[in-house]
Every structure is written in structure tokens, then in C-alpha cells.
Image (tube, rainbow, N blue to C red):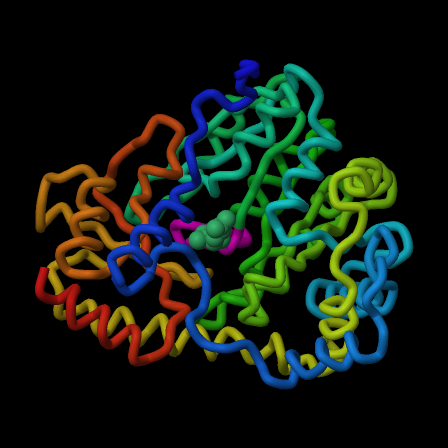
Amino acid sequence: MIPIISKLPQAGTTIFTVMSALANELGAINLSQGFPDYETSPELIELVNQAMKNGHNQYAPMAGLMSLREAISRKTEKLYGAIYNPDTEITITAGGTQAIFTAITAAINPNDEVIIFEPAFDCYAPAIKLAGGIVKSLELEPPDYRIRWDMVKRLINNRTKMIILNSPHNPTATILHRQDIDELSAIVKNQDILILSDEVYEHLIYDGETHQSMARYPELQKRSFIIASFGKPFHATGWKVGYCMAPAALMQEFRKIHQFLVFSVNAPMQFAIAEYLKNEDTYLSLPSFFQQKRDYFRKGLENSRFEILPCSGSYFQSVRYSNITDEKDSDFAMRLAREIGVASIPVSAFYSKGNDHHVLRFCFAKKQETLDKAVDRLIKV
Ligand code: GLN
């Protein structure tokens, strides 16, 4: 065996893969990894079939199909008022994770500092480290996981290159509010600080709240890579199609990496999604669709001993279980999967230091009968 020096010596297999594999092995209800257990729209599937039958089976353009980029540009202008040039400012990616990796690789040089908020989605820190950057994490705490902007201010120095934001937030289901935007704007004004804004849950936002996209605010938009996904809104996480939007100068560097990482993204899905996006109800109907699931799951859990934490967006519901046991969250999550047959994600997995606030994350993007079965089991704990 010829040894190689690990680039990510601390990394194991992601918690999503671990917990989904465990759920499959045990036949447990899988509320761990975030994906729906119901089908995507038959119309969308038919559009993919048609695209394949119509011969769209060769490479798509490197930056993505123009009709899809145009559809994204129209949608972004309509929803958030920003104008992105589809030719130079939008690139279709193989999902959100690839877009995040590509943006970080393009923007971060050795010793650049990147501020992230923990619990953080697990692909941010590895991408920063692989680029030679330094992760500066700020820890957020339950139940409300609010960003303390005075602490952010203290972390800023002349090496700070990027702040990574994620709203609606995975795993905590919190969202940025207008006040956060004001504080952020004051901090980055007149500084050479980029923003990577992971907005893959942009359409999963509840109680009539507004999605605070960076695209709404010119001062923030001009320094942002905005990451979005079609997997979440269109119930097709397995298709791995997402996109990145950024001002042309940033996007030019993004594409230099993208072309050597994936070159281009599968063509038939791009044709289908471009067509499907013509009907804006496909995404405007999502808040009420998912809010109904959120409310149903929360109502069911009211009869349990779990403390139900706030959920303003995303398809995740976190619960605190300090009333039930002192076990570590990873141990408790394993035991719940084995003994009661419900798989979840222990939120300590999203903290680099493994902070354990006794919180588990459940995905509620499931059929009503799946939620019923899960609740029946969880109320017995
Ligand atoms: N975004 C999904 C989640 O949080 C899954 C991501 C993944 O498996 N890489 O569960």
C-alpha cells in the first residue's frame, strides 16, 4: 500500500450517510438525512422523459442550459428584485454541495479566514480547509440559535475573506430577519469580505415570513455567491441539480473551477426543470405544502416528552431531549433508531467541537403516514 497524506484527517463518513445506512439496516423510519419519501411531480418526470426522447442526451453547455439560466434569472428578479445576467452570472451545478465547494475553492486562498456559524452544514469547513483557508466558527445555541453580530464583529480582521450564511438554516430551521441583514450590512460595508449564502431552502419558509435572500440587498448581493438547489423544492434530491449566482467577476472565477470539476451537469434534467419553472406555482405553493407537514409533525410531538424547538424554515424540526435522558446525542440517536425504529441526526455532528446540547434533528418532508408512524413511536419515549 502506498500511503497518502490525508487532506482531511479528522473527517469520517458524513452523518447523513451513516444514519441513512443505519436506518436501512434496521428498517427504521428514516427521518435523518433530509429527503422526501414521496414522489416528485409526474409532470416533471414526464418532461425529463421527453427531453431524453427528444435527443437531449449529450453535454449541456459548461455553465448550464441557457433556457434554464434564463428561467432562474426571471425567477430571481421577480422574487428578490435583483437582475442576474444568465450569460455571465448564473451557473448550473451538480447540486448545492458542488456549488458551495466550487465557490469556496474559487475564492479562498491559503490563510484566508472564513466565518461560519455552528451548527453548520457539514461541507463548509472541509472545503475551506482544502483551499488552505482558516475556519473561524461562531457557536449558536438552542433554543433560538440567534447570531450574535457583536461577536461576528470581533472576529473580523484583515484576513477575513468570507462569511458563510445559511437561511433557512440547516439543521436549526432558523431564518435571517431584516435586523440580521442590517447588522451584516454594517459589518461588511467598505470591507473586502465576500458572502457565501446557502439558500437551498429558500422556498421552505413559514408563517408568512420573508426569505432574506442576499439578492434583495445590492450592498450584499454584489459580494455574494448565492447557492440554490432544485432538489429541495422539486422533491428530487437524487437529481443533484442546483445553481450558483454571483456578479460576473466572481462567477468568472467560479466557472474556471466548475469546468474542471464537473464540466457540465446532466442535460435532460436541465431541459425539464427549465420547462417546469414556467409555472411559478411549482415553487410558490411550497411554503403552504411544507408548513402543513411541519404543523402536523409538531402537533403530534406535543404528546411526547421532547421539547419542540422553533422551526421557521427548511424541512427540519429539532427537539431537545434533556427531560428524557443525559445520554450523548449521538448515543441517543443510535438508541432511538435501534430501539424505537426512528432515525434522526444528532446535532452535535454539526459542531466542530462536538457541542452536545441534547438536540436531535428530524426531517418532516415525509408522507403523512410516515409522520404518523414516527410520532406513534416517539411519544412512547
Ligand atoms: N441536505 C440534506 C440533509 O441535511 C442531506 C445532504 C447530504 O446527504 N449530503 O440531511
Question: Is-magenta flag for residue 238?
Answer: no
Q: Residue furthest front?
A: 1
In-image side of 69 versus 125 (left or right): right
Question: Is-magenta flag for residue 175?
Answer: yes
Q: Nearer the viewer, residue 373 or 2?
A: 2
- Total number of numbered discs in the rendering: 0
Quadrant of the rendering where the C terminus is positioned = bottom left
Percent x, y for residue 355?
A: 29, 32
Q: Residue at x 64, y 79 (%)?
A: 45
Q: Nearer the viewer, residue 217 or 15?
A: 15
Q: Residue furthest right?
A: 87
Percent x, y for residue 155?
A: 52, 22
Q: Name above or below for residue 289 compared with residue 124.
A: below
In-image side of 48 versus 12 (left or right): right
Q: Nearer the viewer, residue 142 or 242?
A: 242
Q: Residue at x 51, y 66 (%)?
A: 204
Q: Residue at x 37, y 54 (%)?
A: 20
Report the magenta residues as a range.
Answer: 167-178
The answer to whether residue 169 shows anywhere in this view is no
Percent x, y for residue 340?
A: 15, 60
Q: Name above or below for residue 115 compared with residue 310.
A: above
The answer to whether residue 177 shows anywhere in this view is yes
- Toward which corner of the image does residue 87 lie, by quadrant? bottom right
Percent x, y for residue 174?
A: 42, 53
Q: Name above or below for residue 87 compared with residue 146.
A: below
Q: Nearer the viewer, residue 102 or 225?
A: 102
Q: Residue at x 73, y 47 (%)?
A: 221
Q: Name above or below for residue 103 compared with residue 34.
A: above
By secondary structure, the bulk of the magenta-drawn segment is best described as loop
